[in-house]
Every structure is written in structure tokens, then in C-alpha cells.
Amino acid sequence: MPFVPTRFIHASNLRLDHQAQGVGAVSIESQTILEDCTLETFSHLIDACREQEIDFLLLSGNSFIADDFSIRARIALIEGFQKLAADQIQVFIVPGQHDPLSAWDLQYNWPANITFLSPQDRDVIDILREDKTIATLQILGSANHKFSQPLKLNQRNQLFNKQEERALSIGLIVANLPIEPRDAVGNSTQAIPLSLSDEFLPEEWRSEESNEVTVDYLALCKGTQRHTFEMHPGVAHHPGTAQGLNFGEYEQNGVTLVTVGTEAQLEQRTLRLASVRWLVLKLNLQPEINRSQLIQLMQESLQSQNRGSYEKLWMIRWQFQGSGELFDSLRSFKHQSSLSNELALVVKDRLPVCIEQSFYLQTDNREHRGTQSTLSQLFQAQLDTFKSETELPLKQLLTQATHLDQNWLQRLDSLTEQLDDQQIFNAATHNGQTWLDVSLDEEVQV
């Protein structure tokens, strides 16, 4: 049966006015762009909603960070929603872990086009266009779900059948449902697998009738990386984050434009709206490479990147692996700065964005394994053993920090999600080789 045609944008983790992490020293111009990047990206989102002539905007969690107490975030939301109201575009807001419903100040007179959904909501919401239901929306996982909805979603959609069309059914799984089990340190132990099998469904809404909870589009809010899972039928999707805020979020950022035509199909398209792009570019430096050749390689790597329409700044982390005289010279901040400035001049007229560069060096262990000191080899062996025996080392350390209070544990748990375990291991390897690569005579004295 064909759908009622509709278009909407699904966005998540906007984190308005939250500041970037792991930046280091940058120019004043870049600093200004970084400080405003989430707000500017939200402005681009509002413009995209109007340009694409969507029926509604779905915000599935973490639109802002309540602990930031940002006035700028609140002003941006009000102004953006008012623009959408002028174009009769509805907005459906689902609270997330960092913007609970209480933080939205429900006493404020929000524009009439705004609908807030609570994790405890049980009712199916009809999304209307000129008094015609174009989609239905419901929080899944609410208590006593199957008793509060006697009709299957697919059957209910057929009640609005005009000209043999049915409304798109949208389900939402929010990140902070109270039914989620918690472990000893307060972390959620419920995970969303790649296959949303019946075993994943909470007991509260599991049913013998196989299609009672079937939806055409399942909106997720889980982390900052985008995911799409085929459900057969239907699709589960999380758009990730519209604007990355650290090098751990260098994967493709954006929001998702969902178009439903008259045929029984659903089309998803990523809209890149970010003003700041985080890039991790990897190069392998052979011992014989010279500076001019390295500049050429870096230039080619930069120019191979496709610039997004709204991008003003690229935050670039160069990851060099190798050995040799040039490689070793780049351990010096002075040489890194010189290389960075020279490359910036070369690409200035060819790359219409500001660039900020940092460097990360990883020694090619295969070249130096036989020349390491005994201390360095022992350290590397212990590091390799720990890495092979531990899947989530940072999480494991947190489970041992029982002396910390719950508030600090939650902060540390949130921080570890932004860190790259492999980069920490790489830094440990580099430091071990630098500090422990001593001569045989020095080892005896130690």
C-alpha cells in the first residue's frame, strides 16, 4: 500500500553552544568559528527545513547540554522555531540524556508548532497536514505499551486510508528511558544490536502478534556516529551529530532528509550543514622522503577532500607513521609549526577554508623492533599484552574507580566516549620508546 507523500528532517545531538574539545592553540579567526559552530550549523538546519519544504522536523535528543546553562542556545532555539512556525513547519522534540524534558522550561510560551514528547508518553501522535494524517509518531518502550494501544500500528494507519494511501509510522527509542537496566556505576546495560531482533524488545511491549510494534521508521539517539539498520520491513536510523566537536567525531556529520513518495519506499539523504570539519589524515613516511615530497603528499591529501557547502574551517590532525631523519625532526614543535605554515601558504589560494593543523607521530615499530632497549621492549610487551586482553580499557579502569562519587563517574564515562583508545595506545608506545630507549650502560646503572 502506498504512503501519503511526506518529507521530514531527522537531526540529533545538536548540542547548541557546546564548545569543541582537544583544540589547542588556534588563530583568533578559527577560535571564533569554533565557538559559534553549533549555533551556525543550527541556523543552516533551519534554512534547510524551509528550502526543502518539509512537513516537520524531528529532533531526537541532546539538542543542547543542560549543564552548559547556555543563554545563546535558548535564544537560537526560540528564533529558529519561530522561523519554522512562520512557514507552518512542525517540530517534534524528544529529550535526550543531556537535555531532559525538565531542562526545556515547559512553562515558557514556546511557538505553537512545537510538540514535546516525554519518555513516558503512551499515545500515538498524528502528524497532520491540512487535517490529513501524513505520519504517526510514538515513543516505543513506554510502560504498558501493548495495553494502551489496542490496534496494531499498521491497522491504525489504515483508518486514515484515503485513496488507498497510509500514513508513515515513526517509532522512537529515546536514550534515557527509565526502564533501562543499569550496572554498578550507572551505565546503561541495554545495547541496540545491528539486528533489532525480538530478544531486544523490552518485555513491556513484546507481543505474540508479530507486527504489533512494526514501524516504517525507527528514530534512534545513540552516540555521535550515524547508523542505519535494516529491519525488514522498515529502517532504524540515527543521524549522528550535525556538527562534530572533536577529532573523535571526524566521520561524516549531518542531518537526514527523509522523503516518502507515493510508492511504498523511503529515501534518506544526508545534508551536510556543519561549518567546522574535523579531518584525520594518515600518511606513511618512508625513510628516504624529503621535505618537498612530504609537502606535496600533504597538499594532495588536502585537495582530495570534498569541501561541504557551509564549511569555513578544517581542523586537521596529521597522523604520520614511519621513520627516518625527516620523521624524527617532526617531533620538534618548531619543525611542526614550520611545516604547517609552509603547507598553509601552498594551499591558500586553492583551498577556500581556514585550516588548523596538529601532528601525531607513530614510529614504525617494524623498523625499530630490533634496536629497542631492553626496558623499551619490556614496556612494549606489557602494553601489547594489556591491549590484547582488554576490549574496553578505559571502561575497565572506570569500573575500578569505586572511590569516586556517582557524579564524577558519569562525567568520566561521558568523556571516555569521546576518546580514541588506539590513539592512547599509540601515545603510550611513542612515550615508551622516547623515555626508555636508553643505552646498555644506562640500563645497568638504572
Image (spheres, grey):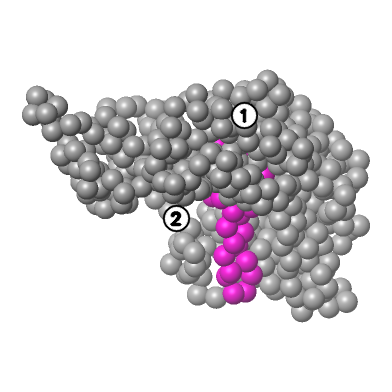
Placement of the N terminus among the 4 image quadrants: bottom right
Q: Position of residue 207 (x, y in %)?
A: 51, 70
Q: Residue at x 58, y 69 (%)?
A: 230
Is 84 part of what is drawn in magenta?
A: no
Element type at mark 2: loop
| Residue 166, numbered circle | none
Name the residue tied to disc 2: 191
Disc tally is 2
Q: Is residue 196 above or below residue 253?
A: below
First to last magenta residue range: 220-247
Q: The C terminus appears in which quarter of the rendering?
A: top left
**Mark 2 Cα shell of 10 Å, populated few (<14), some (14-19), many (≥20):** few
- Nearest to the observer: residue 316 or residue 300: 300
Q: Residue at x 50, y 24 (%)?
A: 334
Instruction: Report which residue position mark 1 lands on.
Output: 341
Give me the C-alpha separation between circle 2 and circle 1.
45 Å
Does the magenta-highlighted stretch encompass residue 238? yes
Give the residue type at disc 1.
Asn
- Disc 1: CA contacts within 10 A as few (<14), some (14-19) or many (>=20): few
Residue at the image position 25 percent from the left and 47 percent from the top = 369
Residue 440 visible in the displayed image: yes
